[in-house]
Amino acid sequence: MMKIFPTSGIKQLDAYTIEHEPIASIDLMERAAQALAEAIMERWSDPATPFVIFAGPGNNGGDALAIARLMAGRGYRPDVYLFNTQGHLSEDCQMNRDRLKEVKDVVFHEVTTQFVPPTLTAGHVVIDGLFGSGLNKPLAGGFAAVVKYVNASPSQVVSLDVPSGLFGEDNTYNIQAHIIRANLTLSLQLPKLAFLFAENAPYVGEWRLLDIGLSQEAIEQTETDYVLTENDDILPMLKPRGKFAHKGNFGRALLIAGSQGMAGASVLAAKACLRSGVGLLTAHVPFCNNAILQTAVPEAMTELDYNETCFSEFVDTDDYQAIAIGPGLGRKPETEEAVLQQIESCQTPMVIDADALNILGEHRDFLNRLPQGSILTPHPKELERLVGTCRNSYERLDKARQLARTAQVHIVLKGAYTAVITPEGKCWFNPTGNPGMATGGSGDVLTGVLLALLAQGYDTTTTARLGVYVHGLAGDLCRKRQGMTAMIAGDLVQMLPAAWRILEEATDAES
């Protein structure tokens, strides 16, 4: 797993590394600069590429100056601007300035008063080393003007650690026009939380992590609520199947889904559940959907609602290990009443999705009546119906964490880097998936996967993390086969067997 620390935590990791490796601060900066310079020269391998480097007065600027020196040693001729308008540089920045002045093949400008901006063309590459992750207030004055100038240019922009002007976590009160718009962000050691939020994508661009040798001991010992799941984290979660196992060993699941005109949601969820290892699946559907479901998913049993067209009655769940409710239910008054009764009466863990979430949004007092071990699976708009309007992704994540704590449920906040949020407030971000999955029915497939895992006895956190990973992996396999534009939810179901096989084979190879 890859921990995500607040920017204050990164400073502590630097300090710990300096003290315990031990290594001098200037030498740690040199190590970071070497990693950054190598990544830049790998991307732009022609030394004739025109580079313009903007360095600020702090350690981010020190990194930029060191990069200029290292690139010059490999035949590049960068044009460097150091902004020292206050007459004060950090100690390491000053040392790298003095080192750079001794290099002949660098055009060096130290800006103390007037800044005459260079011409930036589409052929130029700008290295942004103005400010790093320690920034705690919006850029203003001359630095804001430099940012606007760079953003208005057609040049490619590479930001060091973070785009200048972007805060590492909460940008609610930042000034968007005063943030560098990078094409590539080279982050040191670990990602920043802000990288995972949709509204920051225009500033961060593509991001890569560079290992600069910060203390692994400190990283392991330091706690954080934010973690990016890595592929190797998933394999130990998968339960092996015994040779003498039978369907009774893999749980009985109940899916409450569908209404007139929306049978497809129940079909997708049912197929995904069966493709994710459940022993037995019963789908509770209105009579009008029975023939559709029995034809499309013959492996599932159906239980018919008294109502011809919608879900309208409480279902006895004592014989089931997990329940999923919501896909395609609709919002009829009798459905709303039945959903609330189901939640209040059920003692079995539930996966709450789609219309069931919307009904909860109208009756928030029922959130505290959900069975222990339940999972809510909202997309951003569905979450806002539960917690109120959110100004940005950071606030949305914060409110989702508060809801998980107060309702003592797990929340799967869907989107790029889907967040699995535990009742303790821990956030596990998922690495798999792609924009092709932004299509109707994709969430129904996820509901089916989660239902299957919960019924098989996986604990709730593992269910959520493993479920979103496999769901995203199926999407990535679809992308490889047919691209993103034509992807539909049914393709995800068809790719689930391949996704599970990849995990099974990898687990077998390790055992």
Image (spheres, helix red, strand yellow):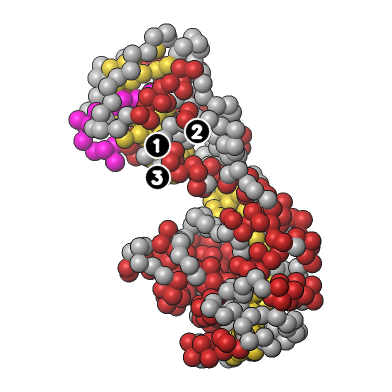
The location of residue 451, given as percent across then percent down, is: 61, 75
Q: Which residue is found at the position 54% from the left and 71% from the top?
A: 444
Was residue 419 drawn as part of the magenta stretch in this picture?
Answer: no
- Give residue 254's quadrant in the image: bottom right
Q: Earlier in the sequence, mark 1 or mark 2?
A: 2
Mark 2 or mark 3, whichever is nearer to me: 2
Magenta segment, which residues? 41-56
Quickly name the residue at label 1.
Answer: 182
Residue 414: numbered disc: none
At label 3, the amino acid type is Glu
Amino acid bearing label 1: Ala
Which residue position holds label 2?
176
Q: Position of residue 445 (x, y in %)?
A: 52, 72
| Residue in the picture at 69% in, 53% down | 387
Q: Earlier in the sequence, mark 2 or mark 3?
A: 2
Foreground residue among 255 and 318:
255
Secondary structure, mark 3, is strand
- For label 3, the crowd category at 10 Å Cα-Cα, with few meaning under 14, some 14 to 19 and many 20 or more, is some
Do the residues bearing badges 1 and 3 touch, measured as CB atoms within 8 Å?
Answer: no
At label 1, counting other C-alpha atoms closer than 10 Å, the crowd grade (few under 14, some 14-19, many 20 or more) is many
Dot 1 or dot 3, earlier in sequence: 1
Vertical placement of residue 403 versus 14, above or below: below
What label does residue 206 carry, if any? 3
Q: Image quadrant for the N terminus?
A: bottom right
